[in-house]
Amino acid sequence: MVAQKITIEPVTRIEGHAKVTIHIDDDGRVERAYLHINEFRGFEKFCEGRMYFEMPVITPRICGICPVSHHLASAKACDDLVGAPAPRPAQLLRELMHMGQVIQSHGMHFFELAGPDLLLGFDADPAQRNVIGLLQANPELAVKAVQLRKYGQEIIRILGGRRIHPNFAVPGGVNRALKPEGRDAILAGVDAAISTIQEGIAIVKAWAEQNKEDIDRFAVFPSGYLGLVTEDGGLELYDGDCRLIAADGHQLERFDGHDYLDYIAEHVEDWTYLKFPYYKKMGWPAGVYRVGPLGRLNVAKKCDTPLANEELKTFKTLNDGKPVENTLYYHYARLIETLFAAERVKVLLDDPDILSQDILNTHCEIKGEGVGVIEAPRGTLFHHYWTNEDGQLTRVNLIVATGHNNWAMSKAVDSVAKTYLSGKPITEGLLNRVEAAIRAYDPCLSCSTHAIGQMPIIVKIVDPQGKVTQTLRRDG
């Protein structure tokens, strides 16, 4: 019998809106904790009837945090739909924009969203445990963090004309070439960005060494892992094969993203609007897996840039060469990927084709179906479009990164609640650990919908008769 039900609503310092309910028995132990995604997206349905070429402009409106990921995945789906692979210079420019997106998104998450927990402490006063508190504690680092995000956004602006919702990628390529002055402006900032990222890596490694006990009991559990890889198994964020490994690290599948429906199905629970993807051959729930930074570094055998590759080697030793299962290591993995993205910026800008005017394939033979896959900052993103003979959309399927991680976030919430709350007086700091389990995955629930107005956190303590005995509130 449930003696208490604690509700955390909404979860703070994430993109979008969610709540957690924690069910506590008569002995004060957590029976079960649930993550509820109480948003409804509906984007797939209201895209029906639109023309395919509108999708790279429409789908970025799903989210203001990761519009570039949807923009590029959509363009790749349209390339496939009309049989017009983008010329190599256009592919380079798209990847360059994507690296800007990874830098700004990962940088913001580590320093502004997750950073307050790590740098100020899970139990710090919530009035200080935020970006303002970071600014007060370490002004120099806070300024560098803002500049890092600005650098990623500048890459997007230089290529796409604006930092949010760029109009750049089109079916068959991109709509503008990179000018020499644009290349030089991006190159001018890359070394400072790399330096800031390395400073962040040093911080998270030092934090991990000091907090190993927490890391080793904070939502540590086995799962599969999914991510894109290069032909020889390297970390890939823009284009490659999907590689799925089991909890012990052996490869389950390596497949073309176009065939994702042969391998991935989705499970539904009545307590959340977000579906639970899983590996078909193993079924639900045995086939669950994780995506995003932890998943990608677990499936990758190397990084094709020197600084990130050295960090990956260290990462691979955290669990004696086996997949790293610790949820809090998502933060370390995220910064390794940010370093990789910044190094890739240099590689791409040094390529002679980056200034080429050969940026568009105008071939158009509507095939009726197209799939685009990309590694969004939060994980693997699928866009799948079906059209009639005129190119008008008849069906749309989107599997967003946060969806892939839905099971893992739910598992992490339940695990942390049972580990830290059972048999103890409920404090704000303990509840913040439950939120931190979600934040580790950097969920983008804005890919479902957008919240309007204030988003306070309200915790209600309920007695066995259902009467609210105490209410704690923190305005968002």
Image (cartoon, grey):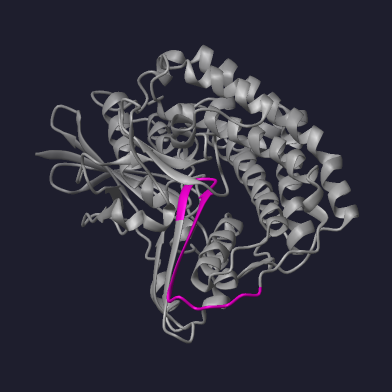
Q: Which residue is rendered at x = 66% and y = 75% of the image?
A: 362
- Residue 128 seen in this snapshot: no
> What is the count of numbered marks?
0
Say if 415 sits above or below 169 in the image: above
Farthest residue to the left: give it: 1
Q: Is residue 363 magenta?
A: yes
Q: Is residue 437 magenta?
A: no
Q: Which residues are magenta?
A: 362-381
> Is residue 68 left or right of 318 when viewed as pictured?
right
Residue 258 image position (x, y, % from top left): 42, 58
Farthest residue to the bottom: give it: 390
- Residue 238 seen in this snapshot: yes
Residue 122 image position (x, y, % from top left): 48, 27
Q: Which residue is rendered at x = 45% and y = 28% of the image?
A: 328
Residue 320 image position (x, y, % from top left): 41, 14
> Is residue 46 left or right of 104 when viewed as pictured?
left
Say if 231 sits above or below 327 in the image: below
Say if 85 sits above or below 153 in the image: below
Residue 60 falls in which quadrant of the image? bottom right
Frontmost residue, 177 versus 427: 177
Frontmost residue, 106 versus 322: 322
Q: Which residue is rendered at x = 83% and y = 42% of the image?
A: 187
Frontmost residue, 154 versus 64: 154
Residue 23 image position (x, y, % from top left): 21, 40
Residue 405 falls in which quadrant of the image? top left
User: Which part of the image, by quadrant, shows the N terminus?
Assistant: top left
> Is residue 255 left or right of 306 when viewed as pictured?
left
Q: Which residue is rendered at x = 38% and y = 29% of the image?
A: 430
Frontmost residue, 91 versus 446: 91
